[in-house]
Image (tube, helix red, strand yellow):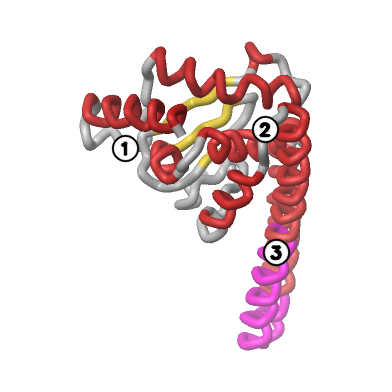
Amino acid sequence: MRFICRLLAMLAALSLAIQPAAAQSVLRDTETEALLQDMAAPLVKAAGLAPGNVDIILLNDPSINAFVAGGQAVYIHSGLINAASSAEEVQGVIAHELGHITGGHIIRFDEGAKAATNITLLSLLLGVAAAAAGGGEAAMGVLAAGQQAAMGKFLSFTRIQEASADAASADFLSRAGISGRGSIAFFKLLLGEEIRHGVSQSDEAG
């Protein structure tokens, strides 16, 4: 508790020091960055990653989110820090994101998007053919079915990645000797927020 209070105090000071317009800007502070790196260090080691190659970056964003977006950088929103009640909860989130890194999910994310796009393109071609044959309603039906199939394919792909990251995070926490109880409770809080690799809660991009 003292650990997270210290982090929250530094976060509050940083938030006051920046302009309100600088939404999603990186909160840079040597002490805060060092604290987050210390929290992540045992997990990075447990994940088999080189400590010097993994960056934990704090973003000035009130939403509850964390993501990875290429390379070995974990982005954490200030809103997530505010919502957490212990260091273990934050570490649980970091472990989850490290699971995406070790699973190569950023690279494979493109594979899932490509598969969904191929389905959409196929349905578009079939829809055009149906329209050319004079079946306007049939064409719309083909397009709608294609979009639904593409979305289903993509969501299935991301669910597999999330399950993989969850399993990896449990392993990393265990190897690091960190209790997973706090992170379980915290992930229940985040259930409606769905932390996804490379994608913020507002679907900005993980």
Say left or right for 25 vs 39. Answer: left
- The picture places residue 55, in percent across and down from the top left corner, at 56, 21
Q: Say few, some or many: other residues with alpha carbon within 10 Å of mark 3 (under 14 / 14 to 19 / 20 or more).
A: many
Identify the mark at residue 150; answer none if there is no mark: 3
At x 74%, y 48%, the residue is: 161
Q: Quadrant of residue 115?
A: bottom right
- The picture places residue 39, in percent across and down from the top left corner, at 56, 24
Q: The residue under label 2 is which amino acid type?
A: Ile
Q: The residue under label 3 is which amino acid type?
A: Ala
- The picture places residue 152, in percent across and down from the top left corner, at 71, 66
Question: Which residue corresponds to mark 2?
Answer: 178
Circle nearer the viewer, 2 or 1: 2
At x 49%, y 44%, the residue is: 65
Q: Mark 3–mark 2 contact, CB under 8 Å?
A: no
Question: Which residue corresponds to mark 1?
Answer: 23
- The part of the chain drawn in magenta is 129-154
Q: Quadrant of residue 94?
A: top right
The residue lying toward the viewer, choosing from 169 and 196, is 169
**N-term-proximal mark, 2 vs 1:** 1
**N-term-proximal mark, 3 vs 2:** 3
Inter-mark Cα distance, 1 to 3: 33 Å
At x 56%, y 18%, the residue is: 38
Number of callouts in the render? 3
Q: Say few, some or many: other residues with alpha carbon within 10 Å of mark 1 (under 14 / 14 to 19 / 20 or more).
A: few
Say left or right for 144 vs 77. Answer: right
